[in-house]
Amino acid sequence: MKRRFLIIATLFAFFTIKAQNQKDTIRNFNEKKNEIKLNAYFTALGAFETTYERNLNKKSSIGITGLYVFSKKNDGNTINDEDTNFLISSFYRRYFGKRYASGFFVEGFGTFGSTDGKQLTDMDGNITLNEGPDVLDLSLGLSIGSKWVTKSGIAFEILVGMGANLFNSDKTDHNVVNRRALSIGYRF
């Protein structure tokens, strides 16, 4: 009798533990950790920006963004006015939405980038353009935005932010880094 009771108790404990693991697996499957996005806004302006984001938990994530300008037309578009060559940014985000890593967020970022070394100077009412070498600089800044993720994993994001160059602002006319995004991506 004791032996039968021990076998039943062991089987019951085994199935209970197995059920808890399956429940955790189902919950974690819905909370996917990786995301890749393409910035459609900059693509329309002649640049390519892609982002990888890793969700740490429900409320925070880290990531890296790469921007490369492949079109240097002088047609008045914002990206071309900045004379940007490339940017590599890392970021940390804090989400305030109810769903897993989505909704309104605040982001702190650091950027390493290259801009053209152009400077406009005003000497006695005469504006002169000084063309110098490309300038490399680091910047720190803040962004705000919002993200929506569908059940199938498609992600939409809007983002606006600004950072200040730290070291070589005197060698170019550009002393700030602007972050703008209207991105679409996939969470996996």
Image (cartoon, rainbow, N blue to C red):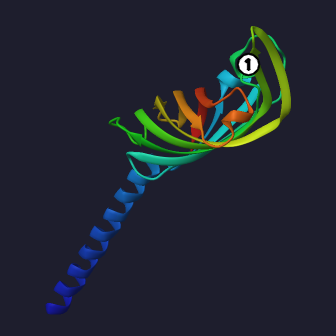
* Amino acid identity at mark 1: Asp
The image position of residue 23, as x and y in percent, is 35, 57
Residue at 69% in and 40% down: 168
User: Which residue is the extreme one toward the left?
Assistant: 1
Residue at 85% in and 32% down: 132
Q: Which residue is mark 1?
A: 81
Disc 1 residue crowd, few under 14, some 14–19, many 20+, Cα 10 Å: few
Residue at 77% in and 24% down: 119
Left or right placement of residue 13 versus residue 53 in this view: left
Q: Is residue 101 in sight in this rendering?
A: yes
Left or right placement of residue 100 versus residue 36 in this view: left
Q: Is residue 71 in sight in this rendering?
A: no
Residue at 78% in and 12% down: 127
The image position of residue 164, as x and y in percent, is 57, 35
Nearer-the-camera pick, 22 or 52 = 52
Count all numbered tags in the image, as a single digit. 1
Residue 140 found in image quarter: top right
The image position of residue 153, as x and y in percent, is 53, 37
Nearer-the-camera pick, 170 or 87 = 170
Nearer-the-camera pick, 112 or 118 = 118
User: Which residue is the extreme one toward the front?
Assistant: 124
The N terminus - image quarter: bottom left
Q: Secondary structure at mark 1?
A: helix
Residue 110 found in image quarter: top right
The image position of residue 101, as x and y in percent, is 43, 41
| Residue 107 versus residue 158 in the image, above or below | below
